[in-house]
Image (cartoon, rainbow, N blue to C red):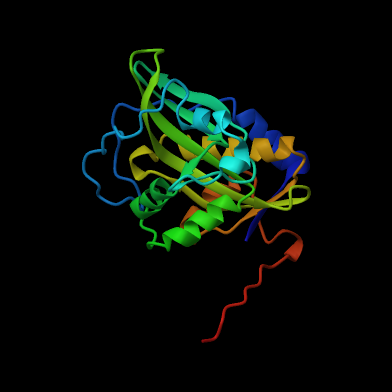
Amino acid sequence: MFVNRGGASASTSCLKASTALPRRRASRGPRLGARDSGLRRPLRTRDRLGRAGRGAQAAEGSGREAAITGDLVAPQMSEVEETTIVEDGASRIIFRIGGLIDVREVEELTEKVGWPRRNPHKVKLALENSFMVTALYRQTLSEPGGSVECEDLIGCIRVTSDTVFNATLWDVTVDPAYQGEGLGKTLMEMTIRKLCRLDIRTISLFAEPQVLEFYRKLGFRKDPQGIKAMFWYPIY
């Protein structure tokens, strides 16, 4: 278990680092852990979203009252905040907090990184009952600076929290086609910044061995002060 305690080192360093946004690269080499997915799949044409994408749909609704529509869910913090990370002509990558989350898109993303398929109904409940979901979307615009024609989920973090002292990050995922460009770091840092602004200063997560160094560079520490995570699993 990794813990990032806000205070001196974690929050200060991540706030400074977040000012450096990633640049799109012309070519990419192989990525560790990424499946061979061939060409990047086209953006969804079924999502005709208007100028501000799916975030605007939630803003026009009534937050939690409009929480579930088909496969769309809204976490507890559903007020929409958006920041443009990269813009390139008629497409851009945005960071979004709040709005509606498509359960099917979340599962498609986790399958791309090689995770086992989960029960969609349980995923829906997990997203709905999460404190916050932060996400990266690639949007296609009708023209440079124009309205949003469609968008694809390319990164996601689910956050549970007591809303005061502690938060835990779950399901940290970035589409393999977009890994190696600094987007995972940006997603993490901007999520931590939001939690720090809410004065939630103890942030934890569970990490696989191959990504420990990635989280260490973001200020997370393994077993701080000798604290150990303990698990209970059913025997049957």
- The residue depicted at 78 percent of the width and 50 percent of the height is 165
Q: Quadrant of residue 9?
A: top right
Comparing 197 with 98, the one in front is: 98
Whether residue 99 can be seen here: yes
Against 89, is 43 above or below? below
- The residue depicted at 74 percent of the width and 43 percent of the height is 6
Q: Quadrant of residue 199?
A: top right
Q: How many marks?
A: 0
Spot occupied by residue 125 in the image (x, y as percentages of width and height)? 54, 57
Along the horizontal axis of the image, is 113 left or right of 158?
left
Spot occupied by residue 2 in the image (x, y as percentages of width and height)? 63, 56
Against 88, is 216 above or below? below
Along the horizontal axis of the image, is 172 left or right of 89?
right
Against 96, is 2 above or below? below
Q: Quadrant of residue 62?
A: top right
- The residue depicted at 74 percent of the width and 38 percent of the height is 198
Against 219, is 47 above or below? above
Spot occupied by residue 120 in the image (x, y as percentages of width and height)? 42, 59
Along the horizontal axis of the image, is 25 left or right of 72?
left
Quadrant (top left/top right/bottom left/bottom right) for the N terminus: bottom right
Whether residue 78 can be seen here: no
- The residue depicted at 57 percent of the width and 59 percent of the height is 206
Residue with the most extreme bottom position: 236
Spot occupied by residue 130 in the image (x, y as percentages of width and height)? 61, 51
